[in-house]
Each structure stands twice: as C-alpha cells, then as structure tokens.
Image (cartoon, rainbow, N blue to C red):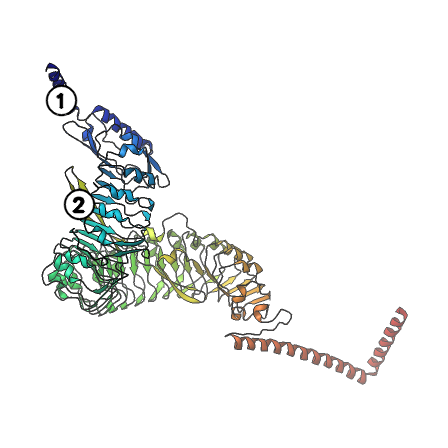
Amino acid sequence: MSGRLVVAVILVFELAHHACNGCLEKERLGLLEVKRFFNAHNFSIDSLPSWSGRNCCEWDGVQCHSPIPHILRLSLSTLLDIDHSQHMLYLFHASLLNPFPKLESLDLSHNAFSAFTNHKYLKNLRELTLNNNRFNDSKLLQELCKTKHLVKLDISSNNFSGEFPECVMNISSLEFLDISSNQFTGTLPSTISTLKSIKILQLDDNNFQGTFSMALLANLSNLKVFQLSTKNTNNLQVQTETPSFLPTFQLNVLKLSHCNLNSKTSSKIPMFLMSQHALKFLDLSHNNLVGTFPVWLLKNNTDLEYLILTNNSLTATLQLPPFKHHLLHLRLSCNTLHGHLPYHMGFLLPSLSHFNVSRNSFEGNIPLSIRKLQSLNIFDLSNNKFSGKIRMSIFSSMPELSRLQLGNNNFSGNIEDELQDSPDLIVLDISENRISGSIPSWIGNLTDLLYLQLSQNHLKGKLPIELCSLQFLKFFDVSGNQLHGSIPSCFNIPSLNYLYMQHNNFSGPIPKAFSKSKELVAFDLSQNRFSGHIPSWINKFSSLQFLLLKGNHLRGSIPRHVCGLREMSIMDLSGNKLKGSIPSCLGNMSFGISNGSKSSYESMGLDFKSVFFVEIDVLFDGKGMFWRISHEDKYSEGEIEVNFMTKNRLEQYKGNILKYMCGLDLSNNELSGTIPPQIGYLHKIHALNFSHNKLKGRIPETLCELKQMESLDLSYNLLSGGIPSNLSQLDFLSFFNVSYNNLSGVIPMSPHFRTFVEGSYLGNPNLCGVVAGEGCSSHKWKPRNQYEGLMRDEGDKINEYVETFYWSFVASYLMVLLGLVIVLFVNPRWRGIWFYFVHLCCSYLFNYV
C-alpha cells in the first residue's frame, strides 16, 4: 500500500512540474530540432521566431494535450521561402517527429517538400495536411494505406502522378480526402464506395479517365462535399442516370465541372439533385447540358448561395422562384438562354452579388428592379442582344459594385444620366454597342477605375479632361469611334499598361504626357492623324511589347531610341511619311526573345475574365470536423488584340497566340538606303515587311538566319542583285514577295520556293527560273495563274524594246554607209584619198600574208 502511495505522490509532483513548465522537456527539445531543420533550409532566416522559452505549448503552431502536456497538433505551414527555392526539392525527415509520441495532426502545407524520409513516424497520425508542396512520392501513399486512424488526408496541389492507389479507399476512418490539383490518371477506383465515414471528398483537377458512376456514392450517408473535374474534358465521363439511384446523403457542396456529364445518355441535369435540399454550392459548368434553366434547384434548396451553370447548352428563358431567395452568385454565361431578364429579379434575389449571363441571347433592356440589388458586386450582360438606352442611374448607390460589363450588345443613344456613389468600381465596359454622343465627363469621378472599355461605338468629340483623374487606370480603350482633336496634356497615367486609341481622328503630335506611362505593354495609336516625329522618349517604355503607329502622318526618320525597347514583339510603323535609312540597331531588339522581365500576361495584375475558385476550410477540434465555404473570384487578363499585316493580309492576333507572334512592318513609307544586315539577328521574328519604300542595294544574305520567318515582303523598292540562294533554308516561309525591284539572276531552287506565285517576282525582268515557267536560257515568262495578263504585258514590253534596239542599230549603220558613199561621189579629192587608203591597206595585208 505504501508503494502505491509513493507512486501516486511522484505522479502528482510530475504533473505539477509539467504544469509549471508547460510542456515536456523532451518534446521541447524535439521542437528546437525541428526549428533548426527549417532554419538550415531557409537561408538562415529564423522561420519560427516565437519558438523560445520554456512553455512550448504556447509557441505558434503548437497545440498540447492535457493534463499531461504532450504535443497533439503541429502546424509547420508556410515556413520555407518558396520563391527562393522554386528550383529546389526538399526532403522532410520524419524522424524529427520521434519525440512526439502523441502527435495526431501534422500540417506541412505551402512548403517545397517533395518526399519524406522514414514513413513509419506517420503511422499514428489522424490528420496529415501536405497541400501546396511538390510531393511526387508514390511510396508515401502506399505507406499511408497502413494507417489505422487517419481522419484527414490533404495532398492537393502537388505533383503526384500515375494511378491513385486503391488501398487508400480502404482507410475506413477517413472523413476528409483531398487529392485535387495533381496529375493522377487512370480510372477512379470503385472501392470509393467503402469510405463510409467520408464527409468531404475532393477529386477535382486531375487527369482521370473512363466512366465514373455517381451511384457508387449512393450509400455514403455522411457525404457533405463532393468535387470532381478533369483537366482533359475528353477523357472523363460522369454518369448520374445509369444506373439510377436514390442517394442517402444530403450534399452541401457539389462540383461536377468538365465531366462530360451524362454525355452518353441525355446530357441533362442530374435527376438525383431532385432529392437534395441542403445545397449551398452547385457547379455543373462545362458539360454541354441541355434543357431549360432548372428553377427547381432554387425552389428545393432555399439555402443555395452559389449556382454555376456556365458553358452548357441551356435554352429558353430565365425563370425565378415565386419567393425571395438569398442566392449570392448566379453564373449562366455561355449558354443559349434568350428572352428578357425577369423584370422583378431585383425583388426576388435581393442578396445577389454576382450576376453573369454573358454570351447568351438575352434581349430587351435592363430591368429597373436591378437598383434593389444593394449588395451587387459583379454585373455582366456582355455579348447578348440587349437594346435601348443604358440607364446608368440604375447602378447608382451600389457601394460594392466593382465590375459593370455591358459590352457587345445593341445599346444605343447618349449616356445622359450619371453613375453615382460607386466608389469601388474597377471595371466599366460598354464597348461594341451603338452609343453616340460624347464620352461622359462623370467617368472621371470613378477614381478607382482600372479598366475602361469604350471601343467600337459612335462616340464623337474630344477626350474629356476629367479622364486625367483616373490615375490607377491600367487598361484604356476608345478605339473604333469618331473622336478627334489632340490628347489632353494632363493624360499622364503612370499605372497604364494597355492604351488603345486606334481608328479615330486624333491629331497633333504624340503627346509627351504618354511618357509618364512607363509600364505600357501595348501602345496603339494606328489609323489616326497624328503628325510630327516619333518621340525620342519612347524608349522609356521598358515593358512595351506592341507598338502600333500605322496609318498616321508621322515624319522624319526612325529614331534610334526605338532600339531600346527590349521587350518588343510587334512593331508597326507602316503607312506614314518616314524617311532616312532603317536603323541597324533594330537588329539588337528582342522580337520574341524574353529578356527576363515579366510578360504582358504577368504584368497586368488584373484579370478581366472571372475565374471562380472554391476552397473548403476544414477545422478539427478533436471532437469532430467542421467546414465552411470560402471563394476567390479572380480576374484573368482579357484577350489582348493586335491587328497586324502579315502574308499580305490583315490578321487579328489575340490571346495566347500573341506569346508566339512577333513582326516588324515599315512598309508604305519613304525609307531609303540599304537593308541593314543586322536585321538577320532577329532570330525569332515571324513577319517582316519593308515593301513600298525606296530601299536599294542587295538583299542581305543574313536574312537566312531568320529561321522562324513566315512572311517576307520586300516588294516595290529599288533592290538589285540576286535573290540569296540561302533563303531557301527558311523552311517556315509561306509568303515571299520581291516584285517590282531591279533584281536579276536565278530564282532559288527549293521545294517551297516553287510554291510562291509568279506575282512574287513581277517587275524584275532579269529574274529567271523554274517559277518563271521557262529555264534561264529562254528568258521567257509563261505565267499560269491570276497574274497571267499582267505578266504577258510585261513580256510584250520587253520584246518591243529589244526589237526597237535592233532596228535602230541597222538604220544607223545604213545611214553612215550612205553618207560615206555620197561624200566620195561628190568630192573628187576625198575620193582619191579614200582609194589611196584602200590601196595601202591591201598592200599591207598582201605583204603580211
């Protein structure tokens, strides 16, 4: 009895000792080893500055058990500097966990780990969070299959590949499984139906293949969240109708996007949703679903907050339930819905914050009840058939409105009323309508505006000086209107990235105010009446990729300052009155070769296409699992468009193709001198147009170094010499024109040179070759295409010149001979001298022989 008392006393003193110190000393020392590990891999930066002192249970990321303060939970998230370690892979030494025998939860998310060493220290964990790393260790998943008590496994946003191990589905204790955003392939295992405890199952953004039946989930009565999508929409097909089933679950979140949903049967919205009454989030986008808008989803799920049905084939009109619904997000873009918007939608959906019905066939005007949507944040009606006047006052007094997109409709008339009290508006798009009148001056009051799109309307007048107040503007497009006058001198917006003013009647010199916009990526003033010189300050645009000054009245020479534009992709100075020579320093420009700065796709910082992300935040307190929906509405960059002449036609380049297209157009000017051989240094250029100038000299042989060249136009110049034979090495060249020069010699012989039309060589009478229809010995063209008549006229002129020369020579010879005879006949003295001279010549020849 006394022995037991001694043990009890010792235990009491031990508990008191630990209660004073706050944690076990062995575990505190173990944590310091963990700290040293991270500091050693983090460039000597103290990753865990709070980890000091005796009470380790109060350190950040550490949670202890009571009454004996064993470490229960350990969060080591976001400790490695991923930016500095982007090319490095780290191993996490699981032996560091050995001092923590009661550890249940480990969070290593948002680091740069690729694998574990010694997996045995993970077998007692209940929660393992590894998302946003670089794990690709297949052995890890196999080892986790041996765990007995795992409740949460999050390996999302890693580099796992291959087939997903079926044994993971045998972990019967799993409540949370997230394998999204990896590279898993193969079919989803049918043993998914054995996860009886599963509540949250996220499988989206992988490369799964084959057919998956939702009937496999029918008996998972605890399931609350299910997300499935694929990166390759052609490989995965999800069936919900065959076989039919009655689910035992009540979902809160369902995402089935990019799944070819029911594509083998009806392509209809899943019927099992009829039995769901607790949905808060539903995403069935990108499935080509048919039928009418499923208003029954709103009627059955009164707590539904997010309904995403974009990129389907839904038809008919938009119907709403006959009662107030607290829907927050309604996204129906890219369908075939039509008719008018419900006139009472503002009363029925009073909580709506995100409304997107773009790319449908809606018509009519904007319902006046929209003014009731005081929580409206995003309103997108673009690419429909809406008409009538735009009543901007509808959107006044909406304090949270950030995006108003009404572009590509049939709205008309002046914008008379004012948009007031919308301090957070960052996107305003009313482009491609039939709006007339002048640009409203009240736009200058929207001082937080980042994106202003007014293009392709019937706007007239000058740019209002009030626009100078938009000092945060990044994208400004007024192209395709009838605006005129000079640009206000105060239009010096330092944040501007994209400036489109083409196809107007602006005049005067290019204003120096633009020089303040040093972050410009696209600068398009083409097809206006700008005059003067190309400004020397243009080299301040260190990020400029698209310089388009075509079709103005610019004079002078091409300044050498343009050679300082190191990020250039497309430069078009055609259709001006530029003189002088082509600067040789143009060969030092990039034209497709990045110099390390951010591309236009990264420098924008604003994305105009909404990309919706949903995350499930899971909290675990030892008694149960709780989750909540969080979303992020990002904006990816809208499609940049550039019109550029290549292959003798005006092409429109936009979106990702601009990453690969680069060209230089100096045509239709008055440039003289020779083509600098340094142009051959532009190795990545795809299109080169120097036509309609006064260039002379030879075609540089260095042009053969332009291996990516697709279009080369040197026509209508004064070039001489031959066509360099090594141009036949340009395998991608599909358009070639050297017509109307002074070229001579043989046209290069190569298979793709023979594909160029004969018009490519017109106006060079001394050129010959197979393309001409005859060998060089004949010097005859025998055209066989659309240029035949013109070519025949040229040949006839050449023959006429040769014939005239011969007849003139004969006539001159006869005239000289006849004059000599007449002189000898009339003058006896000259006749005597002549015969004496002939006698001497004959005597000399006789003696010589």
Q: Residue at x 47, y 61 (%)?
A: 710
Q: Amino acid at mark 2?
A: Trp
Q: Relative to 157, is 596 on the left or the right? A: right
Specify the label residue 460 is tagged with: none
Label 2 neighbourhood size at 10 Å, few (<14), some (14-19), many (20+)?
Answer: some
> Can residue 287 be seen here?
yes
Q: Quadrant of the N terminus?
A: top left
Q: Relative to the observer, which residue lies in front, 786 or 360?
A: 360
Residue 451 position in % (x across, y down)? 26, 57
Depicted 142 relative to depicted 261: above or below: above
Residue 472 visible (yes or no) = no
Q: Secondary structure at mark 1?
A: helix
Residue situated furthest right in the rendering: 847
Question: Which quarter of the picture shows residue 537?
Answer: bottom left
Q: Position of residue 389 (x, y in %)?
A: 19, 69
Instruction: Tell me the distance, in whole angstroms, between the alpha carbons under discs 1 and 2.
Output: 37 Å
Between residues 287 and 374, which one lies in front from this camera angle?
A: 287
Q: In terms of depth relative to the viewer, which is nearer, 501 or 581? A: 501
124 vs 398, nearest the viewer? 124
Residue type for callout 1: Ala
Describe the element under mark 2 as helix, strand or loop: strand
- Which of disc 2 and disc 1 is earlier in sequence? 1
In the rendering, at what x and y percent does residue 239 appear?
Answer: 25, 57
What number is the disc on residue 627? 2
Task: Indicate the quadrant containing the C terminus: top left, top right, bottom left or bottom right.
Answer: bottom right
Q: Residue under circle 1?
A: 16
x 85%, y 76%: residue = 838
In the image, what residue occupies the spot 14% across and 38% down?
623
Q: Is residue 847 left or right of residue 522?
A: right
